Image: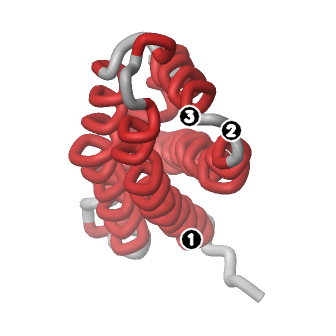
Amino acid sequence: MDGMEAMRVFALVAATITTGLSAGLFYAYACSVMPGLRTTDDLTFIQVMQRINVAILNGWFLLGFVGALVFTLAAVALHLPDDGHRVLPAAVGALVCYTGSLVVTRVVNIPLNEALAAAGEPGRIADPVRVRGRFEARWVRWNTARALLSTAALGFLCWALVLHCHVAPN
């Protein structure tokens, strides 16, 4: 395996792993965290979400979240030469889908998280029903969208690895 080949494999594997981490996070929210919180009272819901939104901002989260974009971009760039074109459509598909999940995160989920934080200490919120009502349904709906987008990106990256390794699917 030459140097270019090794870099391509590394980029594809790293993109697949980090995208899988992000897709798994969004999937966990969609399938367990938010359904689990659905039945809690408003103050508990707000308190838990505020705490999660603070705790999630750490290096391990950023490694997956940002790494997925960086490694997928690298995989696309490394497959641009003529000898990498076979993999390029799948890698670009992954990049488009993952970028879509980032756009949803930046345009919808982060502003909702910031609004929830700005509501203040849960015990001091005058109308917790209103605060939760402005957050929950919209956040859940758009989290599902980013879960689907990042899962599609993961699928594209898996397909890119299959194509790269010249393995014919059964």
Mark 2 nearby-residue class (10 Å; few <14, some 14–19, many ≥20): few
Q: Looking at the image, which residue is at 52% across and 47% down?
A: 19
Up-down relation of residue 98 to residue 117 (above or below): below
The kind of secondary structure element at disc 2 is: loop
- Residue type at numbered disc 1: Trp
Q: Looking at the image, which residue is at 48% across and 17% down?
A: 122
88 lies left or right of 37:
left
Q: Is residue 5 visible?
A: no
What residue sits right under mark 2 in the picture?
A: 40
Give the mark nearer the N terminus: 2 vs 1: 2
Nearer the observer, 56 or 39: 39
Give the mark nearer the N terminus: 1 vs 3: 3
Residue 27 image position (x, y, % from top left)? 62, 53
Q: Is residue 66 visible?
A: yes
Residue 154 image position (x, y, % from top left)? 54, 59
What residue sits right under mark 3 in the picture?
A: 42
Residue 108 image position (x, y, % from top left)? 28, 47
- Residue type at numbered disc 3: Asp
In 3D space, how far apart are the residues under numbered discs 2 and 1 (Cα atoms)?
A: 40 Å
- Residue type at numbered disc 2: Thr
Up-down relation of residue 111 to residue 144 (above or below): above
Q: Looking at the image, which residue is at 55% across and 61% down?
A: 151
The kind of secondary structure element at disc 3 is: helix
What residue sits right under mark 1 in the picture?
A: 159
138 lies left or right of 96:
right
Image marks 1 and 3: residues in contact by CB distance under 8 Å? no
